[in-house]
Image: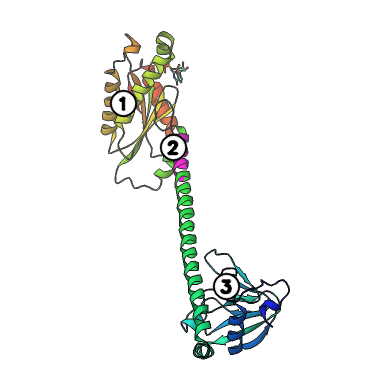
């Protein structure tokens, strides 16, 4: 059957005018010449004509029915109808791997043309075949261009998605940091401390001992009462800075709340722990904050070694008892739990 005889099929008014044809639509004359070289074959819906990657050996003309070409890489399927052709590279360039999968969408009739048969057509009808090939190549080049554009667009989409992911990850990291950080001083807060303690279990101490210092500002309430809350905040920030300065890279300075700070340290013995506590007390004593007027800042410190298997709450209560004793001495003192 001739494609132009089909009701509703794209009519080919003038076989020589290519402009009003679909790119893969044959003129009546082309269809006649090519079909004459092919073998007619009936197909049923779902019948596969070739698979992607399969060695190509022949091209097909559609006499009746519809064929679906499916590509990978997210390209849209193509539905071809009567008077159209597909798989032509097989006869142009010989054996190659199919780019698409071709499956019958409806019952229909096709003409299958082998490369040898196509060679015969070239010899018999060179002018017809030249026009047909010229159009096919132009269509293939346009298709290639479309594919490149499509891949570029996909690449852009991918880059944008990656960027969004990166941004989300950064925002998450910032959010996690904020959750573990004390707003006023920028030191770790209690949550940050617990997280640090969780991770400590996996670290090697290299013959050092883990120790906890609890640091409390003496008579802090007086600062708030006499100089105001802002002056109190400034004092907290200044002491926090000294606490931070005392901590090494694998140690944690933090503010537990109010005027109470904690330091998790790695020391070799009691002597080193005492030196570091005394160093902090001396640094705080030297602070001069204009907003505090005559008030001299000092801290009391309670220390404990974290050897007890009882864990954090045990270490904390030992250090807290020592802190209480230091406070009882009138402040500006330090005690180590025995
Ligand atoms: N400015 C300021 N004050 C705070 C903040 N958090 C807690 N405070 C105040 O800190 C004060 C702590 O008081 P106390 O626990 O009695 O401590 P203290 O006056 O240092 O007493 P001793 O520890 O016995 O020397 C309270 O008055 C709280 O209101 C804060 O973020 N900023």
Tag 2 residue? 177
Write the residue at 42% across / 44% down: 199
Tell me the crowding category of disc 2: few under 14, some 14 to 19, or many 20 or more residues within 10 angstroms, Cα based.
few
| Region rendered in magenta | 169-181
Q: Quadrant of residue 178?
A: top left
2 or 1: tag closer to the N-terminus: 2
User: Closest to the observer: 173 or 24?
Assistant: 24
3 or 2: tag closer to the N-terminus: 3
Does the stretch in magenta take in 156?
A: no
Q: Quadrant of residue 194?
A: top left
Residue 7 pos. (x, y %): 73, 74
Alpha carbon distance from label 3 to label 2 = 70 Å
CB-based contact (under 8 Å), mark 3 and mark 2 = no
User: Closest to the observer: 210 or 104?
Assistant: 104
User: Closest to the observer: 269 or 81?
Assistant: 81
**Dot in front, 3 or 2:** 3
Residue 129 pos. (x, y %): 52, 82
């Amino acid at each position: 059957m001739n494609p132009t005889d089909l009701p509703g099929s794209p009519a080919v008014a003038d076989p020589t005018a290519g402009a009003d044809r679909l790119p893969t639509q044959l003129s009546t004359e082309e269809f006649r010449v090519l079909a004459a070289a092919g073998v007619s074959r009936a197909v049923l819906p779902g019948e596969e004509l070739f698979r992607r990657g399969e060695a190509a050996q022949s091209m097909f003309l559609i006499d009746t029915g519809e064929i679906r070409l499916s590509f990978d890489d997210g390209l849209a399927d193509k539905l071809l109808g009567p008077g159209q052709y597909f798989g032509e590279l097989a006869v142009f360039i010989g054996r190659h791997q199919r780019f698409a999968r071709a499956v019958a969408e409806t019952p229909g009739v096709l003409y299958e043309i082998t490369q040898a048969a196509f060679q015969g057509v070239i010899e018999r009808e060179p002018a017809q075949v030249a026009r047909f090939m010229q159009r096919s190549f132009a269509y293939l080049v346009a298709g290639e261009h479309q594919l490149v554009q499509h891949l570029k667009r996909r690449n852009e989409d991918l880059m944008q998605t990656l960027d969004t992911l990166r941004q989300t990850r950064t925002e998450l990291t910032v959010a996690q940091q904020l959750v573990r950080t004390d707003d006023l001083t920028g030191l770790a807060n209690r949550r940050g401390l617990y997280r640090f303690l969780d991770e400590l279990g996996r670290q090697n101490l290299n013959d050092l001992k883990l120790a906890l210092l609890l640091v409390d500002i003496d008579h802090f309430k007086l600062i708030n009462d006499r100089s105001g809350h802002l002056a109190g905040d400034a004092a907290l920030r200044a002491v926090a800075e000294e606490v931070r300065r005392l901590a090494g890279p694998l140690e944690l300075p933090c503010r537990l709340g109010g005027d109470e700070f904690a330091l998790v340290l790695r020391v070799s013995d009691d002597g080193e722990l005492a030196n570091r506590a005394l160093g902090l007390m001396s640094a705080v004593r030297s602070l001069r904050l204009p907003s505090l007027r005559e008030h001299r800042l000092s801290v009391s410190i309670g220390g404990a070694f974290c050897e007890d298997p009882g864990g954090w709450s045990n270490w904390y209560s030992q250090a807290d008892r020592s802190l209480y004793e230091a406070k009882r001495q009138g402040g500006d003192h330090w005690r180590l739990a025995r």
